[in-house]
Image: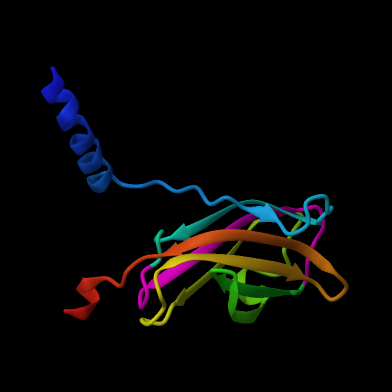
């Protein structure tokens, strides 16, 4: 009986190594009590974790109560608390404009440089129209080790 208990931690460790890991993206608004016009429902990152030098897609499911004809996305990325990257995109290149009242998706794909260090990153995204901030969210994402398949 004690032999089974001795093998149990090894069996659990092996199971965790070979089973797929499902990670929910925990999204927070930048200001806890703010009343943003655009409500973010979820963020999907594919693949997760991201591999440097490989394409990654961030898809944001959101909802708005009014039509949005134009705007921009301002993205800031931090690594261990240090600001490492900023970029601004035209909202209408990341979704179809005008955005109608109701549910919509914002999707952005890009390839991170092969030299991107692995680890946990924090992304802050603001969605703005000409007059004001429509929403502001923060979430963490992981960058894994570079795939050895890409080196073949």
Q: Tell me where residue 122 appears, x and y as whole percent.
A: 57, 65
Residue placed furthest toward the top:
1
Residue 90 seen by the camera: yes
Q: Position of residue 26 (x, y in %)?
A: 57, 50
Residue 110 in the image: x percent, y percent? 47, 76
At horizontal 45% and vertical 62% (from top left) the residue drawn is 142
Q: Is residue 130 left or right of residue 90?
A: right
Task: Give the residue drawn at x 64%, y 79%.
Answer: 89
Q: Identify the residue at horizontal 24%, vertical 76% (top origin).
A: 150
Quarter holding residue 56: bottom left
Indicate whether 49 appears above or below 115.
Answer: above
* Closest to the observer, 61 or 34: 34
- Quadrant of the rendering where the C terminus is positioned: bottom left
- Name above or below for residue 44 compared with residue 117: above
Quadrant location of the N terminus in the rendered image: top left
Residue positioned 76% across, 74% down in the render? 70
The magenta segment is 51-69
Quadrant of residue 94 within the rendered picture: bottom right
Is residue 152 rendered magenta in the image? no
When asked about the image quadrant of residue 10, the answer is top left
């Amino acid at each position: 009986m004690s032999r089974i208990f001795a093998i149990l931690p090894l069996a659990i460790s092996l199971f965790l190594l070979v089973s797929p890991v499902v990670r929910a993206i925990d999204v927070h608004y930048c200001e806890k009590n703010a009343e943003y016009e655009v409500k973010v429902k979820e963020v999907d990152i594919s693949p997760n974790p991201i591999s440097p030098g490989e394409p990654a897609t961030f898809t944001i499911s959101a909802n708005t109560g009014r039509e949005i004809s134009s705007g921009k996305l301002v993205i800031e990325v931090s690594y261990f608390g240090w600001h490492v990257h900023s970029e601004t995109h035209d909202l209408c290149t990341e979704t179809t404009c005008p955005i109608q009242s109701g549910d919509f998706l914002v999707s952005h794909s890009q390839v991170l440089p092969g030299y991107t260090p692995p680890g946990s990153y924090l992304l802050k995204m603001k969605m703005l129209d000409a007059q004001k901030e429509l929403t502001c969210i923060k979430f963490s994402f992981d960058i894994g080790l570079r795939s050895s398949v890409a080196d073949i």
